[in-house]
Image (cartoon, rainbow, N blue to C red):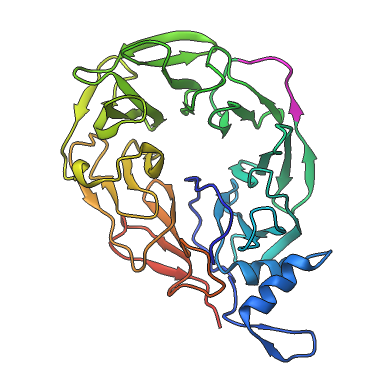
Amino acid sequence: MVRLRRHVLTVASAVTSLALTACAQSDPGGGSVDRETAYKRVLNDPHPNPDAVIKAAGAPVGVARAGDGSLLLSYNVRYFGNDEGPAAAAWRIVSPAGRTVAQQAWHASLERLPDQYNGVRDGFVRWTRSGRGKESVYALDVRGKRHKVTTSDRARGTRPGDIVLHEGMPARFYRPANRIMAAPAGAPDYVDFALDERGSVWFVDQSQKPNRVVQQRDGRTLTSTPMPKPYTYGGAVTAAGGTAALFLLHGGPNGTTRGLAVTADDGAHWRSLTGGGVPWQDLKPDVALLELRALPDGRLLVGEKGGRLWVGDDRSNRVFHELKTPVPFTSVTVQGKTLYGIADATKPTYDLVKGEGLYASDDDGRTWRRQGKRG
């Protein structure tokens, strides 16, 4: 079931059996109803039931993991015929043993960005923004209890343990130690940024030509490197596990992707990757349709959103192998050698697609197991 979403590659590493959804819904009297009727009933319910929203959704749109292995699954459903029609959303927290601990559902405004969830040591943090630009953020513990997050009125230097809440416009990070949200000091608010485990902020300075990839820590610039010739523009940067990388663009800031710029020594040296087993010339030309993420062990995942994906064989990221998936995935969640893939429709439909649901792999995508079953 396709829903309003922003595909974000989030981090998770638990292996747990999840109760997803059933292929058909039943009305309160026990009679079977078709999916379109049941789907619209969920949207029009003034007090949507979490189980009903999750069943109508068909597959989660995101997965986040807490420090104890608990997972938060988020779901969205929307009206297909009108972008201003009703919408509903839900989340469900599942314990490491696979038991539903807490869940919640509500009507969602289509003018608001879909809620984004990130896993932290003691639970999860949720961020969203309305169509008028008003931000909302709070924390959830693994029992589903809500906790206040303080919004800083000034930009702050980043530290080890901080995580990215929103990559750009506005740029926001979260400090789990004291539950504070802030803008990263020194980074332009309009650009996407990455935050590594050492507390370094990485972003592409687009005010210069050629663009420069900048690394800052605690508001101080540590490295500033121009795009390698013949490239003058760079895509959004990713950083983790001692690796930082960004797309090399040909023909302007919205140009065609031709490879990667990669560093494995804290920005001291960069190299261009234009091969490595990735058919760069065959990828979608729009960088907004591509995925690039550094995994916690320093390997890179690159490819098309909802399409083919490749993972580095090791942290040198000189050779890549393609992920083989049992069904097409619309998003992939990664941490180390654990991958989660979500299979969902890419076009509006009331029916479930073949294999819709959540999958997991511990061997770089060579084998996959289905998480939970539908009736």
Residue for point 43% across, 75% down: 354
Task: Please indicate, yes or no, whether residue 265 appears anywhere in the rendered image.
Answer: yes
User: Eyeballing the image, is 175 above or below 91?
Assistant: above
Magenta part of the chain: 150-156
Name the chief secondary structure element in magenta.
loop
Q: On the rendered structure, is 277 left or right of 233?
A: left
Q: Nearer the viewer, residue 65 or 91?
A: 91
Q: Position of residue 161 (x, y in %)?
A: 56, 29
Task: Please indicate, yes or no, whether residue 94 appears anywhere in the rendered image.
Answer: no
Which of the 4 image quarters holds residue 186?
top right
User: Eyeballing the image, is 320 above or below 243?
Assistant: below
Residue 98 falls within the magenta-colored stretch: no
- For the image shown, how many numbered marks are present on the structure? 0
Q: On the rendered structure, is 62 left or right of 222?
A: right
Q: Position of residue 356 (x, y in %)?
A: 47, 70
Residue for point 72% across, 34% down: 132
**For the view shown, which residue lies furthest in the right direction?**
46
* On-image quarter of the N terminus: bottom right
Q: Position of residue 359 (x, y in %)?
A: 44, 64
Which of the 4 image quarters holds residue 177?
top right
Residue for point 30% across, 54% down: 308
Q: Nearer the viewer, residue 64 or 9?
A: 9
User: Eyeballing the image, is 125 above or below 45?
Assistant: above
Q: Position of residue 269 (x, y in %)?
A: 25, 17
Q: Nearer the viewer, residue 337 or 245?
A: 245
Residue 151 falls within the magenta-colored stretch: yes
Which of the 4 image quarters holds residue 293?
top left
* On-image quarter of the C terminus: bottom right
Q: Nearer the viewer, residue 172 or 121?
A: 172
